[in-house]
Image: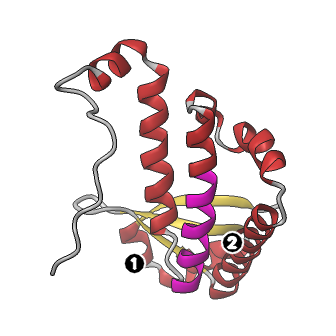
Amino acid sequence: MTAAYEDVPFSELLHHPAATTRRLDTVRALRLRRRDAGDLALMRIDQMERDASVVDFTSRLLTGLVRTENIAALRQVLPEALPWSTFLPAEDVDTLLCELVDTARGAVALDNLAPIALLLTQWRHSAEIYADPALLAILTREPDGDLGPVPMPEAAG
């Protein structure tokens, strides 16, 4: 099995493009380190397409499991995929699963996985709050904490 990625200075790609890209024969991707900007990834298009098909399959599988009343099974295995989810209240786990399915379907349709990463980050932060009793107390204390549900705005007339 090939390694996931290899770190390479961006300048190496500029100075030795053929030799650098040949490294993709032994790794899935190259992480191009840049000094003054974010790192980049270089991968073969066939690898990117395979990765996209796996994400698409996973999204569709997850959607199918939720739609066929297998939410209990998903709830049971969720801590293996997202260990921090054990700190979420049960009703929030159900909300997370529904949001994850909807977001994954939309993200795959757009070929943009950023919404999934954002959703997982947001839920992870929620779990961090629930895991810390002092922080949860501060954030739910009246009147400075959570003031409950916000009423729906009235329709413009």
Question: Are the residues at dot 1 and dot 2 in contact (C-beta closer than 8 Å)?
Answer: no
Residue range of the region highlighted in magenta in the rendering: 96-110
Name the side, left or right, on which 93 lies relative to 56.
Answer: left
Residue 134 at what x, y percent from top left? 35, 12
Residue 78 higher or lower than 5, as above or below: above
Residue annotated with mark 1: 15
**Residue drawn at (17%, 24%) of the image:** 143
**Residue drawn at (41%, 27%) of the image:** 129
Residue 148 at what x, y percent from top left? 32, 37
Which callout, 1 or 2, points at the residue further toward the start of the chain? 1
Q: Label 1, secondary structure: give it.
A: helix
Q: Quadrant of residue 37?
A: bottom left
For the C terminus, the quadrant is bottom left
| Residue extending farthest top | 134
Residue 57 at what x, y percent from top left? 77, 75
Name the side, left or right, on which 51 lies relative to 114.
Answer: right
